Amino acid sequence: MAIVTFSSPMMHKDKAVYAIAGDTRTALLLAEENKIPIPFECRDGNCGSCLIEVTYANPTDKKAVMLTDKEKLTLKELGKLTAQEIEDAEVRDMPPRYRLACQFIARDEDVTITFTGDPGGA
Ligand code: FES
């Protein structure tokens, strides 16, 4: 069970929700179910509106990082993902700072998801 905490200037206070182990709901779906206003448009990793910053409660607890080609491309276009971060994610299981909420799935790690409320801003 992962605790996903959402934080944004758009919200009165942080909100923590549970993601069940094996859950395949994206951060965007979790947010919607809990009335958390992450901006979005395409839901498909293309527009970048749902940009989020993800911090891990235990950053040394390494997990395989799932970055699709589409998410990599969109984050690179937004200037939010470097070649070094891609290599760190794929070779060293070091998660990048920025993700797309419509692609990111919290599995069994506790994370804090921050977003500004501006589409494509995090
Ligand atoms: S909603 Fe378009 S990239 Fe996530």
Image (cartoon, helix red, strand yellow):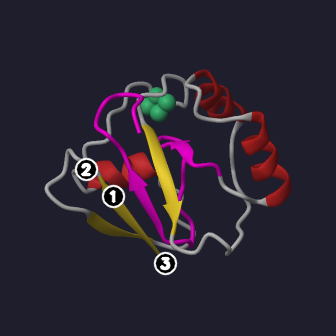
Q: Are marks 1 and 2 in contact (CB under 8 Å)?
A: yes
Task: Work out how far the residue at label 3 is from the one at label 1, CA to CA, in angstroms.
Answer: 16 Å
Report the disc number at residue 21.
none
| Residue where numbered disc 2 is placed | 36
Which residues are drawn in magenta?
96-122
The answer to which of marks 1 and 2 sits earlier in the sequence is 1
Of tags 1 and 2, the one toward the viewer is: 1
Report the disc number at residue 6.
1
Q: Amino acid at mark 3?
A: Met
The answer to which of marks 2 and 3 sits earlier in the sequence is 3
| Left or right of 35 in this view: 94 | right
Mark 1 is surrounded, within 10 Å at the Cα level, by few (under 14), some (14 to 19) or many (20 or more) other residues, namely many
Task: Work out how far the residue at label 1 is from the one at label 2, CA to CA, in angstroms.
Answer: 8 Å
Q: Amino acid at mark 2?
A: Ile
Query: Per the image, is 107 magenta?
Result: yes
Task: Note whether ligand 1 is within 8 Å of mark 1.
Answer: no
Query: Per the image, is 20 magenta?
Result: no
Q: Residue furthest left?
A: 12
Report the disc number at residue 1.
3
Query: Of helix, strand and loop, which one carries label 1?
Result: strand
